[in-house]
Amino acid sequence: MAISNGTGTHPLDLQPMSEFERMIRERIEYTPEDSRAWYYLGSFLRTHGKLQKAEEALVMSLELEALNPDALVHLALIYDKTGWSEDAGSLWRPPTGKLWKSS
């Protein structure tokens, strides 16, 4: 499936895209395994208030690179903003699920 239809709009939401968003979506089209590209898309969408689409992109970034700290931070910010504070807090725990302890 093509990400860009050549008109500067994304076929899924038909809203005009910025040049940056178009470039990131093209990168994802050609290298969908690029965790950083998914992170950049999610970060961009979050700052433009498209929280659901941002969450989807950030989750994809984390599926490709489970401990990407940048993606974790932006996902936590989305969860905090949307009132999912329990989900936001769970992102700050280490992978074992235990809270950090000082020695």
Image (spheres, rainbow, N blue to C red):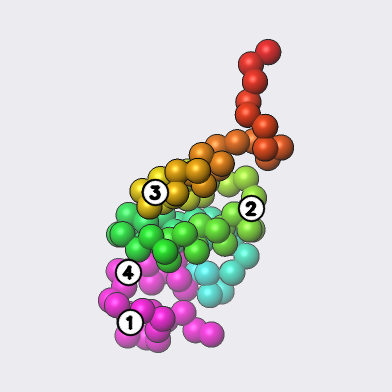
* Residue with the mark numbered 4: 19
Query: For residue 103, what is the image quadrant?
Result: top right
Q: Secondary structure at mark 1?
A: loop
Which label number is shown at residue 65?
A: 2
CA gap between label 1 and label 4 equals: 15 Å
Q: Residue furthest right?
A: 96
Give the magenta range: 1-26
Q: Looking at numbered disc 1 in the image, what kind of residue is underneath it?
A: Leu
Q: Secondary structure at mark 4?
A: helix
Q: Looking at numbered disc 4 in the image, what kind of residue is underneath it?
A: Glu
* Residue with the mark numbered 1: 14
The residue located at (36%, 79%) in the rendering is 13
Q: Is residue 29 visible?
A: yes
The residue located at (64%, 58%) in the rendering is 64
Is residue 13 one of those drawn in magenta? yes
Q: Looking at numbered disc 3 in the image, what kind of residue is underneath it?
A: Gly
The x and y percentages for residue 65 are 63, 53
* Left or right: 81 in relation to 96: left
The x and y percentages for residue 17 are 31, 73
Q: Which mark is first along the chain, 2 or 4? A: 4
Q: Residues within 10 Å of mark 2 (few under 14, many from 20)?
A: some
- Is 58 in front, or is 19? 58
> What is the chief secondary structure element of the magenta stretch?
loop
Front of the two marks 3 and 1 = 3
